[in-house]
Image (cartoon, grey):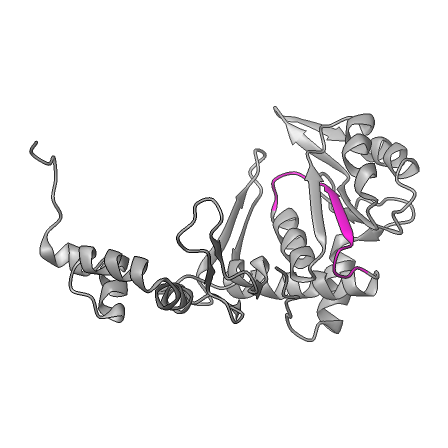
Amino acid sequence: MTPLWTPSPERVAQTELARFMKLAGKSSYAELHRWSVEHSEEFWELVWKFGQVRGEPGQRRVVNPGRMPGAKWFPDGRLNYAEHALYPPVGVGEDGVAVIFAREDGRRRRLTWRELRTEVAAVRAALVRFGVGRGDRVVALLPNAPEALIAMLATASLGAVWSSCSPDFGARAIADRFAQIEPTVLLTVDGYRYGGKAFDVRDTVADLRGQLPTVTTTVLVPYLDDDATLPDSVRWPDLIAAGAAHALGLAFEPIA
């Protein structure tokens, strides 16, 4: 069978696999594959380094390499997902665009990698002040917006648990999802837009809070109205400002 396309030697030499083979000192894919099978611990240690994994690999690289199922990689390793999501890829600078947000009414926002990390650090500092730590639960009634991403990464950086759902859910459906994990912090918008219409959800939020007795702090993200308020809540802009003032930089709780 004739291949439809074959990359040129120059293109092959620029691939990540070619870079890895060079680092491993192997001249062909067959040689690399054989080495990965016969010297699996060395192979996986190099994979960790080549992938620039941020974390601690632990003493064991691979357990039961000849069994499938049964093999385990880096069983003692510890890392944090958020740490890997908050730094630009190779070749992209700190001022490169990390997030592009566009809403149906035309509102837009861009965040650079530096700006994204700064806001995550601010929210992380605020969550710490709210008493959130490893294993605690943070829930969000948020649309697909930068605030949802920022809050999720801040939560993950603490080793806490994140759960979210769309603001167009009803109070009963939201409570069924959130109540079972006993959250301590709730983030919510004042409303959302769909099909050219605005829908205020603050009455739903009031009902929801009555069904979440473990929530000690509610954060309001103004989405429909920049001046929106909600009783007994912290506004997102105030949270960012206060968090930025107290943030000592980002830290990441290593978890399995």
Magenta stretch encompasses residue 9: no
Q: Nearer the viewer, residue 181 or 73?
A: 73
Q: Residue furthest left?
A: 2
Residue under the image location 78 percent in, 54 percent down: 136
Q: Nearer the viewer, residue 191 or 151?
A: 151
Does 31 appear above or below 221?
below
Magenta stretch encompasses residue 136: yes
Residue under the image location 70 percent in, 48 percent down: 162
Q: Residue furthest bottom?
A: 248
- In the rendered structure, the answer to whether residue 41 lies left or right of residue 123 reads left
| Residue 171 in sight from this viewpoint | yes
Q: Nearer the viewer, residue 48 or 252?
A: 48
Does 46 appear above or below 180?
below
The N terminus sits in image quarter: top left
Image coordinates for residue 85, horizontal then vertical, percent:
52, 58
- In the rendered structure, the answer to whether residue 58 lies left or right of residue 171 reads left
The C terminus sits in image quarter: bottom right
Magenta extent = 132-145
Q: How many marks?
A: 0
Most common SS among magenta residues: loop
Does 93 appear above or below 190?
below
Q: Quadrant of residue 195?
A: top right
Q: Quadrant of residue 31?
A: bottom left
- In the rendered structure, the answer to whether residue 92 lies left or right of residue 13 reads right
Image coordinates for residue 242, horizontal then vertical, percent:
77, 66
Image coordinates for residue 166, horizontal then vertical, percent:
68, 33
| Residue 221 in sight from this viewpoint | no
- In the rendered structure, the answer to whether residue 4 lies left or right of residue 213 reads left
